[in-house]
Structure formats: C-alpha cells, structure tokens
Amino acid sequence: MQVESELTDHHIGWIFEATGKEMESLRTMRAAVPQSCFLLFAVLPSIIFSPRADAKTYRGVGTSPETSYVIYIPDKLNLKTRHPCMVGFDPGGDATAVLSHMSQACDDNGWILVASNNYHNGCTFEQTDLFIADTIASAIRTLAVDPTRIYVGGLSGGGQVSHGFIQKHPELIRGLVTNCGMINQDYLKENGYPSGTGKAVVFLTNPGDFRYKEIAVDCRMLKGRGWTTSWMEFPGNHEWAPPKYFSAAFKWLDKQAAPANDQVVKKKP
C-alpha cells in the first residue's frame, strides 16, 4: 500500500512493504520475549521494491491491524552478509518521519532501517513491548540483519520507549540513539536499568530542549552503569535532529562495536 513520502526523489535505496502473512517469522523470537507475542502478531515482509528513480514508500500491515512498519535498505547493500539494524520510532507514529531523518545515516553507514508506524505517544510499555519484539524477530528472520547489532532509537517518546525496551530486553539490543528522549522514571523504579557492558548510547539534544536537564541526568546514570556514551548537541529545540547527526551517531556506534572484534556475520544460504 503506497503512502506519501518525501523520500521518493532524493533518497537512494530500496523500500520494502512489510505484510503479515504467517507465523513462521516469529520462531526466531528469543526466550526473553513474552510468549503472548505469538498469539497477537505475525510479521513477514513480502518484498516490493523500486529503484532510486521511482522509489516508493510502503506501509506494512501485520495480521493484527496494530502492526505497521516500513523497511529501508540502502542501494547496493551486500545482502550476502548481515548488517546493523536500527528500529526507529516517531512520537506521532509516523514511519516516514523516521525515514526522512535516519535513511541518510543508513546510506552513509550501510545499516538497515525498520521504521515503526504503530508506536505513538500514549501507548503503554506493555503494548510496545509486544510489537517491538515481534518486529525485531521478523527483521532477524527475513532480512540481512546481524542479530548482535540491533539498535533502537527515536524522537522524544520514541527515545523513551527505546529506553524502556532495553530495560526489559537488554539481551536483544546493542545500543540506542535517543533524540530528545528521557528515561521514564516510574518504569526505571520498576525495572531498573541494565549494565552497559558492550553496549553504547548516543544522546542527541540541545539546550533548547525542555528535556535537556533530564537527559543529562540519564547520561550520567548510564555512564555509571558501564554504558559507553556519546553526547551530541544540534541547533534547535525539542525536535528531530538533522540527518547528518544521525549519520555521525551511526558511525560512532559502529566504532564502539569494532573493539569487540565483531565479525561480519555471514548470512546462511
């Protein structure tokens, strides 16, 4: 199903439609993911692609009407190997907003982007926990994604839900990019925050962001928990950072993975 997008003319790459067809894609779900996921969601992307000249943006719909996302794969990406994957969230549930700010970073760094349509401010952590886990399982099952290099991130509430998912499922996520998004303090009291051994986080914010002070507290807290952190300020307010900052953030996250001697994971035939 085609939707309007500013990406059509000036972004290189391939946009895939994600449609829910069967339960097979969920069999790679890791043990920590609630079993109720298997009853509620199924996401198996069916590939519908367009070259750069007439690239289109597609809205994916799962077997549940609440499951919807878009997949972006940079042009000429080697799909015989696996690549880092960013699962991105916009507070208004707009995947095209995620694409317009993060797709250039994927082009520059060779990442795959999965942009959620169905997360929006007002969703509970319990609701988002199900579809994020489902989406990640689908990406690992069906795309050239390195399961050891899954990242989450987004603007405002999209950054907050990224923190929340890591708090519940640290074994699934390598790191995050939070753009003007703070940690939910009630959720922090309930679940704590995992240690950051081998993990990294980028904080994108600026003094005009009304969450600036809270995010600074989050940064200090994560440093204390052993996370490798990067603080990047961009001109603006409580808003999406320009695409070049995401390119810098993805590049930095790649460098943090390198000391662990990560090897490119060969995709099984």
Image (tube, helix red, strand yellow):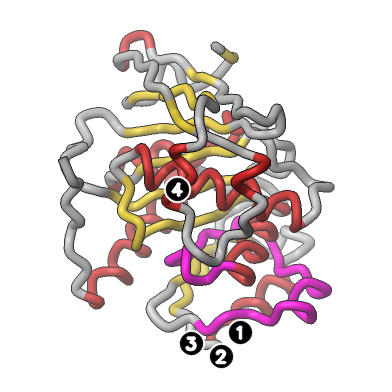
What residue is disc 4 on?
27
Labels 2, 1: front one:
2
| Mark 2 to mark 3 CA distance (whole Å) | 5 Å
Specify the amino acid type for callout 4: Arg
Whichever of labels 3 and 4 marks the residue nearer the N terminus, that label is 4
Answer few, some or many: residues within 10 Å of disc 2's Cα (few below 14, many 20 plus, some between 14 and 19).
few
Answer few, some or many: residues within 10 Å of disc 1's Cα (few below 14, many 20 plus, some between 14 and 19).
few
Q: Is residue 144 magenta?
A: no
Specify the amino acid type for callout 1: Arg
Q: Looking at the image, do the residues carrying marks 2 and 1 touch, with CB atoms under 8 Å apart?
A: yes
In the depicted structure, whether residue 22 falls above or below residue 153: above
Query: Looking at the image, which residue is at 48% across and 40% down?
Result: 114
What residue is disc 2 on?
224
| Mark 1 to mark 4 CA distance (whole Å) | 38 Å
Whichever of labels 3 and 1 marks the residue nearer the N terminus, that label is 1
| Mark 3 to mark 1 CA distance (whole Å) | 10 Å
Residue 59's x, y, as percent? 57, 22
**Span shown in magenta:** 169-195
- The answer to whether residue 171 shows anywhere in this view is yes
Specify the amino acid type for callout 3: Gly
Query: Looking at the image, which residue is at 52% across and 55% down?
Result: 152
Whichever of labels 1 and 4 marks the residue nearer the N terminus, that label is 4
| Mark 2 to mark 4 CA distance (whole Å) | 36 Å
Q: Looking at the image, do the residues carrying marks 2 and 3 touch, with CB atoms under 8 Å apart?
A: yes
